[in-house]
Image (cartoon, rainbow, N blue to C red):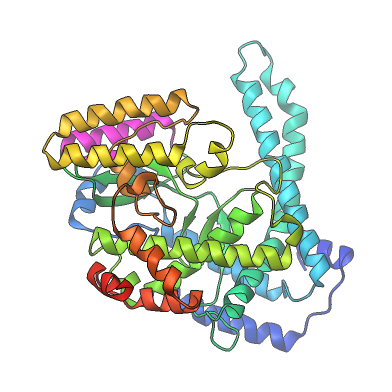
């Protein structure tokens, strides 16, 4: 029995059924052996242009095989201890809340340590940060103890939400819903300059510095005559799926569901053909976003009803991209992020369609400065930015501009009798024309 098991046994008490656990473990091992090689929508896929880009990134690329292997064994270890079925519902909720509180305290402590080391007025930084570092170590230990249980509980809750919404067979999602909290890789997004179209997506180590990011962007852009931007991502659709560490429970539930939908679609035409056309990519991402938000919201309402009406569950919220959550920011100021970003995309598309590439790039930079003046810290606003963020078109406006794909996906959801019907209809589509026929 490891430290985590001993802690939970002492605090909550449990007596798991050995046969049930062994059958569950064998099921998960079999699923992992089949699906561990899946790299779905949010993760990069190799193309000819990607190979060119990788000549500049190989030394700092994210190691997916090692991550998947480690995550798979973590899931097996969670199965061995019988989580989450060993606890009562009330204890499950307590564990999740304790994990989120530990995460919030850890993030705040790390930020305070960074402030000390960045403060030129602090001479003896080691001594000044000693107490905080000791506290950080204890928080890391507590977080590591709670994380396996919290992950098992949350993935089970989202899995039950999928089952109750009709997206499971015999109560079991296929593939089984498994996720792992992790530092997510950065993504180097590459777009053509003459039109907004993603041509490469390469995952990089999350630890590379901003200076290193800028150098990679500039080297690739100048050598290949493309538009580049390195972005943060909140989740990756490998298997088990990868979800960024945060304290926003609503966002966590939505993202767990979002990434599983990518796994589900990847076994069907819409996922298999993810990189075939920009339209199919947008159809895939928008379907996952719509479904993820619905399933996550359902799980939040069922298991955490006291939080379902709040926009912030715990004090510290970390978002991977302001455009995905700008509705909250817009409430605090008259500047409408989505409307302004929509107008920027439309104008940029018009200029590019006229062959005015330099003028379009100059315009986007001018607009970036306007966003900066209104509190939105966008380091770059270019073709690559829109190529990445424009594919998430589950909400009107924003970076998608006048792209008709997002509205068509939303229209199909509106006319579908259920989320199950919507996702299954989208899953078998192989072109935007099929979607247009479906909504007609």
> Based on the displayed image, in which of its 4 quarters is residue 254 positioned?
bottom right
Q: Number of numbered discs present?
A: 0
Q: Determine whether, in the image, residue 99 is placed left or right of residue 33.
A: right
Q: Is residue 328 above or below residue 436?
A: above
Q: Residue at 13%, 34% (x, y): give it.
A: 356
Residue 224 located within the stretch drawn in magenta: yes
**Residue 314 image offset from top left, x and y in percent:** 71, 46
The answer to whether one can see residue 41 in this image is no
Q: Residue at x 78, y 29 (%)?
A: 131
In the image: residue 151, left or right of residue 53: right
Q: Residue at x 61, y 69 (%)?
A: 158
> Furthest residue to the left?
355
From what the image shows, is residue 388 above or below residue 347?
below
302 or 128, nearer to the observer: 302
In this rendering, does residue 54 appear at all?
A: yes
- Magenta-highlighted residues: 208-228
Of 371 and 156, nearer the camera is 371
Q: Residue 138: horizontal and vertical position, in percent? A: 77, 43
Residue 334: image location, x then y, percent: 52, 31
Task: Residue 349: say if magenta.
Answer: no
Q: Residue at x 26, y 48 (%)?
A: 54
Q: Does 23 sit left or right of 430 as displayed?
A: right
């Amino acid at each position: 029995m490891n430290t985590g098991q001993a802690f939970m046994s002492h605090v909550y008490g449990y007596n798991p059924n050995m046969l049930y656990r062994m059958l569950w473990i064998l099921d998960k091992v079999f699923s992992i052996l089949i699906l561990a090689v899946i790299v779905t929508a949010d993760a990069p896929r190799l193309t000819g242009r990607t190979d060119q880009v990788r000549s500049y990134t190989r030394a700092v690329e994210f190691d997916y095989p090692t991550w998947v292997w480690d995550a798979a064994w973590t899931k097996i270890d969670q199965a061995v201890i019988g989580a989450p079925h060993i606890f009562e519902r009330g204890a499950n909720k307590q564990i999740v809340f304790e994990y989120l509180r530990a995460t919030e305290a850890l993030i705040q402590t790390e930020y305070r340590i960074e402030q000390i080391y960045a403060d030129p007025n602090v001479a003896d930084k080691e001594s000044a940060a000693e107490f905080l570092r000791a506290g950080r170590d204890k928080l890391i230990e507590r977080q590591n103890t709670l994380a396996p249980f919290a992950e098992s509980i949350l993935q089970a809750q989202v899995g039950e939400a999928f089952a109750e919404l009709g997206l499971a067979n015999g109560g079991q999602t296929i593939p089984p819903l498994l996720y792992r909290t992790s530092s997510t890789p950065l993504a180097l997004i590459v777009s053509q300059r003459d039109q907004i179209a993603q041509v490469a997506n390469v995952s990089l180590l999350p630890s590379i510095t901003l200076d290193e990011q800028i150098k990679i962007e500039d080297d690739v852009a100048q050598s290949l005559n493309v538009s580049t931007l390195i972005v943060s991502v909140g989740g990756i659709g490998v298997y088990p799926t990868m979800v960024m560490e945060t304290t926003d429970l609503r966002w966590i539930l939505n993202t767990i569901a979002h990434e599983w939908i990518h796994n589900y679609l990847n076994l069907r035409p819409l996922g298999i053909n993810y990189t075939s056309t920009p339209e199919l990519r947008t159809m895939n991402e928008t379907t996952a976003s719509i479904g993820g938000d619905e399933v996550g919201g359902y799980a939040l309402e069922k298991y955490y009803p006291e939080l379902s009406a709040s926009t912030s569950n715990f004090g510290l919220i970390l978002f991977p991209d302001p455009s995905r959550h700008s509705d909250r920011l817009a409430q605090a100021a008259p500047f409408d992020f989505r409307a302004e970003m929509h107008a920027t995309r439309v104008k940029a598309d018009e200029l590019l369609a006229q062959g005015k590439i330099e003028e379009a790039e100059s315009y986007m930079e001018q607009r970036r400065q306007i966003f900066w003046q209104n509190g939105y810290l966008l380091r770059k606003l270019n073709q690559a930015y829109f190529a990445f963020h424009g594919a998430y078109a589950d909400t009107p406006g924003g970076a998608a501009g006048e792209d008709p794909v997002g509205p068509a996906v939303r229209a199909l959801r509106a006319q579908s009798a259920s989320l199950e019907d919507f996702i299954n209809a989208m899953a078998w589509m192989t072109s935007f024309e099929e979607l247009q026929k479906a909504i007609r």
